[in-house]
Image (cartoon, rainbow, N blue to C red):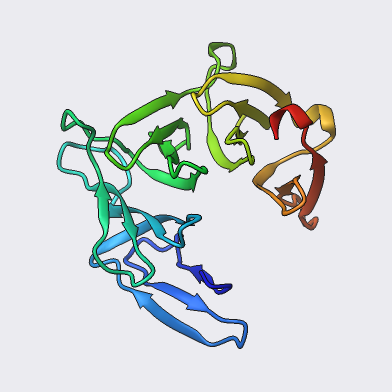
């Protein structure tokens, strides 16, 4: 936010505060999760901070008493809008692990439902209405939404970590394309984003002592 970097320790099993680091390397704590664990972070185009939260303790199973929430804070970190249930009172999220927003400020959430990181992609608006839920094409079987990016025309490019593939969806959750990363000689992808000139950057983990890599891929014009 404001060219500063926000971060937290997601790997911790306990409450971990939200911190900010400036270009001068000054670190300050900006928010305490109040006995909750932060599962995802995002800053939208309005400079609002969007946080995925869950209660401390085991991640699964998820019961009716489990707290799984997305909180939206203004730039002053006060007065959050909480998204937790849909308009019929049903729990929206199991484990919000990754969050992004589009030009209409619709929230896209990688929501996990097992310890094996399988799950679905949810599109939710700020009135707690579920726009769509995407669980991958049936031919793939298991689906693992890991990371995703939003194109300028609000298409979603989603990394399916388990199948090592990219799913391209339109804003209504319709699959437009499915690309195997193996066919592009890209393996063990773990993160992606779109840079400011429209290239897709794909981060890959290193294996057996090798260093990780970042691949730069040109996105087809029809998806941008």
Q: Is residue 218 visible?
A: yes
Tag count in the figure? 0
- Percent position of residue 4, x then y: 55, 74
Q: Nearer the viewer, residue 213 or 170?
A: 170
Camera-side residue of 110 and 198: 198
Q: Is residue 56 visible?
A: no
The picture places residue 78, in percent across and down from the top left corner, at 27, 68
Residue shown at 48% from the left, 23% from the top: 135
Toward the top, the furthest residue is 139
On screen, residue 27 above or below 59: below
Residue 54 vertical position relative to residue 121 in the rendered view, above or below: below
In this view, 222 is above or below 60: above
Q: Quadrant of the C terminus?
A: top right
State which quadrant residue 18 falls in. bottom left
Q: Residue at x 20, y 44 (%)?
A: 66
x, y percent for residue 200? 74, 44
- Image position of 49 (left or right of 211): left
Splitting the image into 4 quarters, where does residue 162 fall? top right
Q: Residue at the location (53% across, 26% down)?
A: 143
Tell me what residue is drawn at x 34 percent, y 72 percent: 76
On screen, residue 172 versus residue 39, left or right, reads right
Compared across the picture, whether 116 is left or right of 140 comes to left
Indicate the position of residue 98 as horizontal and vertical percent values. Answer: 48, 47
């Amino acid at each position: 936010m404001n060219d500063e970097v926000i971060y937290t320790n997601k790997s911790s099993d306990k409450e971990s505060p939200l911190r900010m680091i400036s270009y001068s390397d000054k670190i300050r704590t900006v928010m305490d999760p109040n006995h909750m664990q932060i599962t995802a972070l995002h800053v939208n185009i309005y400079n609002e901070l969007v946080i995925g939260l869950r209660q401390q303790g085991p991640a699964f199973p998820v019961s009716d008493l489990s707290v799984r929430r997305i909180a939206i804070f203004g730039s002053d970190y006060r007065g959050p809008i909480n998204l937790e249930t849909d308009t019929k009172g049903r729990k929206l999220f199991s484990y919000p692990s990754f969050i992004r927003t589009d030009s209409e400020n619709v929230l896209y959430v990688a929501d996990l439902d097992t310890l094996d990181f399988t799950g679905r992609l949810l599109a939710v608006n700020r009135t707690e209405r579920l726009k769509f839920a995407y669980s991958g094409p049936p031919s793939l079987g298991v689906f693992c939404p890991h990371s995703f990016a939003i194109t300028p025309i609000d298409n979603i490019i989603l990394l399916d970590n388990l199948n090592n593939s990219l799913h391209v969806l339109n804003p209504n959750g319709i699959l437009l394309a499915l690309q195997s990363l193996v066919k592009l000689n890209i393996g063990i992808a773990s993160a992606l984003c779109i840079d400011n000139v429209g290239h897709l950057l794909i981060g890959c983990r290193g294996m057996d002592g090798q260093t990780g890599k970042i691949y730069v891929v040109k996105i087809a014009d029809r998806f941008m």
